[in-house]
Image (spheres, rainbow, N blue to C red):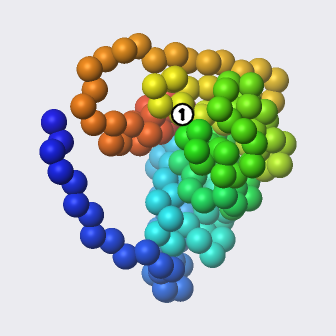
Amino acid sequence: QQIMRADSEVIGQIDDETGYRLEAAAKTELKNFAALVLSDYGKGVLADGRAQNLIIAAKNAGVPVIVDPRGADYAIYAKADLITPNRKELAEATGVDVSNNDGVEKAASILIRQHSFDSVLVTLSQDGMLLVTENESLHVETHAREVFDVSGAGDTVVATLAGALAG
């Protein structure tokens, strides 16, 4: 069981040179990978067009892109294969009431139309997940477990999906 967590972080834009080197390295290595995961922690790494540049490079290489988004502007992730917002992030991005599955499906469909995502997988905490594509949706319910700490649950979902798509 995790008893305490303490983080020390810097939030801000990375300098142009670092951003350029990071993007170039990622593009060079794309040929060696079967999936690209962009986890946006809002630290500035995916800002200044880097997210979109990486998505385009991955698409050109035939590599599926999964995005764990942050913030309300999902245009920076346009054309990603799959995005994985949680319920709160989905509401912030769309302004839609997502207190029930119908609202979640409506909001996810809006994002699919606006940003050309193939699918949106919304994590719903204890209510499971809702996968939405242009033509259908699938609700995956949770099964009760004794859970002490949900830290990293979203990262686990993204990693599992990336492994499945890569396979």
Front residue of 60 and 129:
129
Tally the numbered discs. Answer: 1
User: Which quadrant holds residue 160?
Assistant: top left
Q: Is residue 71 above or below residue 18?
A: above
Q: Quick one: label 1, few (<14), some, or many (20+) residues within 10 Å? A: many
Circle 1: residue type:
Thr
Instruction: Give the SS element for disc 1.
Output: strand
Front residue of 74 and 151:
151
Q: Position of residue 12 (x, y in %)?
A: 47, 79
Q: Is residue 147 visible?
A: yes
**In this image, 134 relative to 73: left or right?**
right
The residue that disc 1 covers is 123
User: Which quadrant holds residue 130?
Assistant: top right
Q: Which residue lies at the image location 60% right of the left edge and 59% below the top edge? A: 71
Q: Quadrant of the N terminus?
A: top left
Q: Position of residue 20 (x, y in %)?
A: 53, 79
Q: Position of residue 133 (x, y in %)?
A: 74, 29
Front residue of 41 and 2:
2
Q: Which residue lies at the image location 55% right of the left edge and 18% below the top edge? A: 140
Q: Is residue 159 visible?
A: no
Q: Position of residue 104 (x, y in %)?
A: 69, 32
Q: Which residue lies at the image location 66% right of the left edge and 58% below the top edge? A: 72
Q: Is residue 103 above or below residue 136?
A: below
Q: Residue furthest top?
A: 143
Front residue of 163 and 110:
110
Q: Which residue lies at the image location 74% right of the left edge and 59% below the top edge? A: 75
Q: Is residue 36 above or below residue 42?
A: above
